[in-house]
């Protein structure tokens, strides 16, 4: 259901605007973001027993917390996408991900995955039906500068890939019994 053509834009990448650009390369961000919920669910389904709570290092997130973070980021992306379309030159409001993570202690991996999947489906429906001209609508990120609606979509894709790799690596670690 991908109707938006990103092919001409991804090559003209500004890494300052999307800190996750290196994960995306020249791939179509819409193809990536459409596959993430399924890939997350596959990777999580293959995790060894107890691995979702395993912490790679003190202060680092475990898999369950990374899933909570992805669901929370989708809340933020969902809001940014809609504000970008609705308002002239929307100014994005950053958030402190470590402070948001303060709530993750009691939250479940299943809840996070389900929230991410539903919100992502809704965002893809929005992005897929956004007219080409609106993809270039300008927004400003206070730390990363001026960007477009399309940059938000590219950032979602790069951010997905970054965390998919992170979770897959945790799953593949061989740990002492
Ligand atoms: Ni992240």
Image: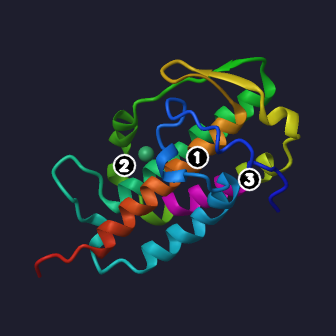
Where is residue 138, by image quadrant?
A: top right
Q: Which residue is tagged 1?
A: 156
Q: Who comes first in sequence, dot 3 or dot 1?
A: 3
Q: Is residue 115 magenta?
A: yes
Q: Residue at x 48, y 21 (%)?
A: 143
Classify mark 3 as within 8 Å of ligand 1 or not, answering yes or no: no
Distance in Å between CA atoms under marks 2 and 1: 21 Å
Q: Residues within 10 Å of mark 3 (few under 14, many from 20)?
A: some
Look at discs 3 and 1 and give the one toward the viewer. 1
Residue closest to the eye, 121 or 5:
5
Report the residue that reaches farthest toward the left.
176
Give the image location of residue 43, x and y in percent.
Answer: 45, 73
Q: Position of residue 78 (x, y in %)?
A: 66, 41
Magenta segment, which residues? 112-121
Kind of element beneath mark 2: helix
Q: Is residue 71 among what the camera can see? A: no
Mark 3 to mark 2: distance in Å? 26 Å
Q: Which residue is mark 3?
A: 124
Residue at the image point whose x is 67% and y is 55% from the top = 28
């Amino acid at each position: 259901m991908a109707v938006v053509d990103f092919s001409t834009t991804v090559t003209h990448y500004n890494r300052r605007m999307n800190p996750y650009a290196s994960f995306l390369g020249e791939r179509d961000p819409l193809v990536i973001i459409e596959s993430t919920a399924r890939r997350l669910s596959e990777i999580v389904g293959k995790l060894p027993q107890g691995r979702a709570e395993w912490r790679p290092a003190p202060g680092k997130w475990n898999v369950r917390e990374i899933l909570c973070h992805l669901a929370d980021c989708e809340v933020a992306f969902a809001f940014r996408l809609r504000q970008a379309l609705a308002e002239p030159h929307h100014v994005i409001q950053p958030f402190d991900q470590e402070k948001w993570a303060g709530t993750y202690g009691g939250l479940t991996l299943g809840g996070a995955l389900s929230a991410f999947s539903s919100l992502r489906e809704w965002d893809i429906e929005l992005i897929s039906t956004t007219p080409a001209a609106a993809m270039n609508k300008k927004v400003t990120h206070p730390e990363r500068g001026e960007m477009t609606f399309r940059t938000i979509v590219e950032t979602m894709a790069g951010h997905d890939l970054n965390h998919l790799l992170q979770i897959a690596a945790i799953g593949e670690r061989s740990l002492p019994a």
